[in-house]
Amino acid sequence: MKILVTHAGMSGPAAVVAERIARVMTGLGADVTFLPMAGVSTVKGFSAVIAGCMEQGGSWVPEAMEFVRRNQALLNKKPFAIFTIIPSLASERGAESRMVIMQYTAHVRGMVHTVSEGFFSGEAESKENPQPGERSKFKLRLLLGLLRESQSQSQSESETWAAGLHEKLVKLLAK
């Protein structure tokens, strides 16, 4: 399974989240290419694409929207997952907030079908790098089926989402 993990911008919270997602996917056996959107010339040749960016003014940033428009035809032929960094997400919980947040990516879903969407606050994502061995412990618990909801709370939300997405992609691509 060859996966492209890409993000808008050259650095910042979206790049940190994309890198964590790429690491989880790689750790679970996927062949991952990790690039900023500006460095992606085509999505051809990838089994699946994961793309994300910061929310800006209630929607995706222009660079990310242009990436989707430019690659729309190919993205509609393969599993496509998206993630959005919403700095205020930590305080926005509940069904009403979820409805508002889902509107941030409605224009993306209007162009391309998504198999999964992740919404992250970016706060936990931008913390210092984890202690040596933490990622390996996470992967081992995941592979052994020992990752429980209470344990995943101490792990990055993006890593947990990526692990679930990997499982979903394996099933979708096996068909």
Image (cartoon, grey):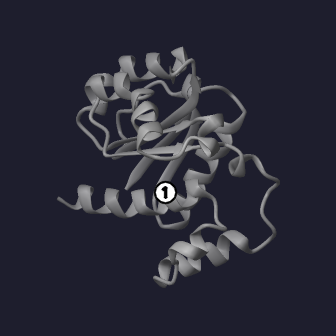
Q: Secondary structure at mark 1?
A: helix
Q: How many marks?
A: 1
Residue 48 vertical placement versus 103 (above, below): below
The percent position of residue 135, horizontal first and vertical second, equals 67, 69
Rendering quarter of residue 80 = top left
Where residue 20 sits: x, y (%)? 62, 53
Q: Which residue is mark 1?
A: 161
Residue at (35, 39) in percent of width and height:
45
Horizontal side of 134 relative to 14 (left or right) equals: right
In the rendered image, residue 15, in percent from the top left (x then y), is placed at 65, 38
In this rendering, the answer to whether 141 lies above or below 154 is: below
Left or right: residue 31 versus residue 124 is left
* Viewer can see residue 82: no
Report crowding for label 1: few under 14, some 14 to 19, many 20 or more residues within 10 A (C-alpha): some
Residue 136 horizontal side relative to residue 113, left or right? right
* Image quarter hosting the C terminus: bottom left
- Nearest the eye: 116 or 69: 116
Looking at the image, which is closer to me, 25 or 85?
85
Q: Residue at x 45, y 19 (%)?
A: 65
Identify the residue shown where x is 44% and y is 31%: 100
Depth check, front residue: 26 or 62:
62
> Which image quadrant: the N terminus?
bottom left
Q: Is residue 36 visible from the viewing direction of this image?
A: yes
Q: Amino acid at mark 1?
A: Trp
Residue 108, percent from left and from top: 37, 26
Residue at left offset 45%, top offset 16%: 66
**Residue 151, located in which quarter of the rendered image?**
bottom right
